[in-house]
Amino acid sequence: HADKLLEFSVMPYAKHKRLLIVRDVTSYREMDEMRRRFVANVSHELRTPLTVLQGYIEILDMQLVDSPQQSKTLTILDQQTKRMCALVEQIMILSKIEGAGSVDLNTVVNVPFLLKQIENEAIELGKNKSLTIKFEIDPNLHLLGDEMQLRSVMANLIYNAINYTPEHGSVKVRWRLSCKTGGHFSVVDDGEGIAEEHLHRLTERFYRVEGSRSRDTGGSGLGLSIVKHTLSHYGCELKVQSTIGVGSQFSFIIPTRYLIEK
Ligand code: ADP
């Protein structure tokens, strides 16, 4: 059946026998694709009115503010519109990554340079909370891939560590060759940590840990989902180790075939 999508698995069955299980997942995949397209279209349509709203908020800000109360209202309008724009942008990125069957991973990405840029931004962000931020980067380790996507993966993990680490905490970022298994990227923080029962759900869309600082950070719960889907294009997985009250480590290993040593 050329038009059918079949999934195969093999299970042990009695002694010296195997059971071949064939599942027809055509309708499941079609529904998932419909969902993805719907979400992509809705978020695309939301972009225009949001841009118009932002424009009018800027005009009001320049012309009409003559009391502290009005100024406060406009600030809230501005913050919430920006938050909605960021959310729509993230939803669009996610549905694009989910929809991409394969990604062109043939461009050489200068990872040390990219991480230097993120480091400068991270140090600025960390100043507000007096965080100690350290980057240990192999200057010769580059990658074949998509620069925007790699930046988004690395920045997401680094900014999360900054967001979920309280004042005077520390964040350590490492990018190095790992015993021939690939390029090892890790972000370690000594922040609030995550309880065991949440760990396996962190990469679900919109999942945020209740009771953590998540509510204050204004995030969407989409960041780690984007990270997971992007990494799957490189054939690698996000690993999370965390202990509540001690800190977290988020890491992944990019397979050797994508590494370029200069
Ligand atoms: P968000 O936009 O909420 O940050 P993410 O998908 O990036 O969404 O992360 C999902 C949730 O995982 C966060 O809301 C937070 O509860 C938890 N989390 C992520 N990174 C960390 C971290 N370094 N330390 C503690 N909790 C974290």
Image: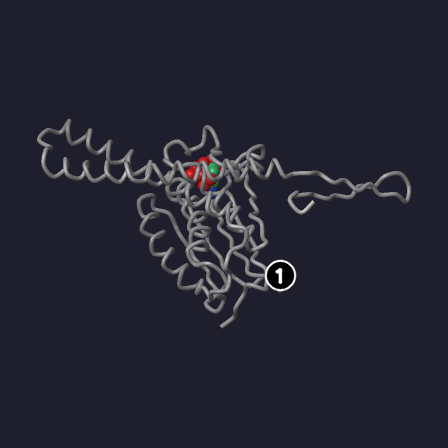
Q: 175 or 29: nearer the eye?
A: 29
Amino acid type assigned to the residue bearing label 1 in the image? Thr
Kindly tell me whether mark 1's CB lies below 8 Å from ligand 1.
no
**Mark 1: secondary structure:** loop
- Tell me if I can see residue 36 in this picture: yes
Q: Position of residue 220 (x, y in %)?
A: 41, 36
Q: Position of residue 89 (x, y in %)?
A: 37, 43
- Tell me if I can see residue 191 in this picture: no
| Residue at image point 51% right, 56% down | 103
For residue 168, above or below residue 80: below
Q: Position of residue 224 (x, y in %)?
A: 48, 43
The answer to which quarter of the image holds residue 217 is: top left
Assess disc 1: are there few (<14), some (14-19) or many (≥20) residues with their C-alpha within 10 Å of its C-alpha. Answer: few
- Determine which residue is flagged by label 1: 181
Q: Residue furthest right?
A: 15
Q: 255 or 95: nearer the eye?
A: 95
Q: Residue furthest bottom?
A: 262
User: How is the protein colored in the picture?
Assistant: one colour
